[in-house]
Amino acid sequence: MSKFDEIRPFYDEEVNDALLSVAKHPMMKALMSFTFPNKDEDFWINEFKNVHSINDFQSRFISQTVLQILDRSSEGLTTSGFDQLDKNTSYLFISNHRDIVLDTSLLNLALLNGGFVMTSSAIGDNLVKRPFLHILAKLNRNFLVQRGVSIREQLNSSKTLSEYIFQLLTQENRSVWMAQREGRTKDGNDATQQGVLKMLAMSAGEQSLTDFFKTLKIVPLSISYEYDPTDALKMPQLMANSRNEVYVKDDNEDFTTMLSGVLGQKKRIHLHAGKVLDNELDNIASQHDNKNKQLQAIAQIIDDSIIYNYKLWPTKYIAYDLLYKTDQFSEHYTEDEKQLFERRLEMRIDSSDEAMKQSFLAMYANPVINKMKQTENTSA
């Protein structure tokens, strides 16, 4: 028994049995029918018999699923920054987080197409409670972040998670994807939780904090969707938060959100891989002795990179102008694009509810606001 058995994905020798055990599951049938619309069930069941590694499954099947998702619900994926990375090096991609399934799936498609090492990716165990989803996650090289455990268990769970990520990066030469925070960003404000960095630092041992983070080769990843396919679904929680109410998830909410993220219209999508954190960490070490101050500074560098490299689509500028009743950014969009966005707003929420309308617009406008603040701070 490995201490990582509760959280790790399948080993390659376990893949074939696991895959065949769910080959005829209704959800696998739905997934493969979506992926291969012109093939019958016998096709993929026979193909599955020859799958003996996660890489096989991802490159032959899941990459095709993601291509179908892009074809049916987007106007394409563009990438930048990946040409600055080394194909034989493992990286820790710390990413802003908009969509449960797609954020990491799109990154892996970009890595596969570029000839890079695909990632092992963190996923909350609350999202894979259904047995089929648990198996599918492990077939996609997801490792589990344990949610809802006691304070005492949380410490052990975080330590195990930290050690596993460190092993993947330094011993297995496997890149890792992690969200910068627990859960998706609901309001468009992308900010790294220091708790994520503290968890990673549990494996630092005798190394200084900044030297340890250099060994992880952190790449801040900026993911930008022109339309957020789950925008309306985020409204109830945002409204509850604005009223200082406790928000309680519906039992099927995560699953509904997954499906909406996959099938909902996204228009254009852009991924940017930032520069590997290196010299910045040396600067932090020379400026701060206190570990908490260092963690705060590292989180800020990641945030700065994600915000700076975040692609601002016309929808973001439209939302800003509608929110502040201005035409400040009108050169960044056409009248048709504005009308399309306003129609979406009317269809997705009750736009007579002024507070809800403001929250919806702010979700799209906040990346513009954050980039404006960043520019002001830089020039100050």
Image: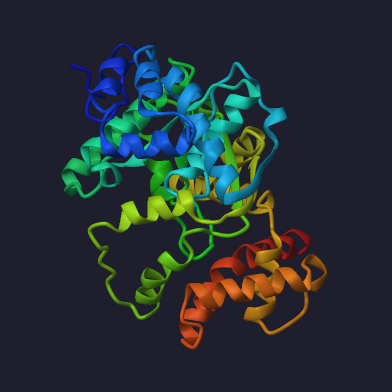
How far across and how far down the image is residue 29, in percent?
33, 35
**At 51% across and 40% down in the image, what residue appears?**
94
**Camera-side residue of 235 and 335:** 335
Would residue 26 be visible to someone looking at this image? yes
Q: Is residue 32 above or below residue 372?
A: above
Q: How many marks?
A: 0
At x 62% / y 76%, what residue is drawn? 342
Is residue 183 visible in the rendered image? The answer is no
Name the residue at 53% across, 80% down: 358
Residue 225 in the figure: left or right of residue 48: right
- The N terminus is located in which quarter? top left
Compared with 240, 120 (above or below) is above
In the image, residue 46 lies at what x, y percent?
A: 36, 17
**Looking at the image, residue 245 lies above or below residue 140:** below
Q: Quadrant of residue 78?
A: top right
The image position of residue 373, as x and y in percent, is 67, 66
- Left or right for 113, reference 168: right
Which sits in the foreground, 343 or 329?
343
Does residue 227 appear to the left or right of 356 in the view shown?
A: right
Of residues 38 and 292, the one nearer the viewer is: 38
Q: Is residue 286 left or right of residue 234?
A: right
Q: Quadrant of residue 152?
A: top left
Where is residue 43 drawn, in percent x and y?
41, 22
Q: Quadrant of the C terminus?
A: bottom right
Chosen colour scheme: rainbow
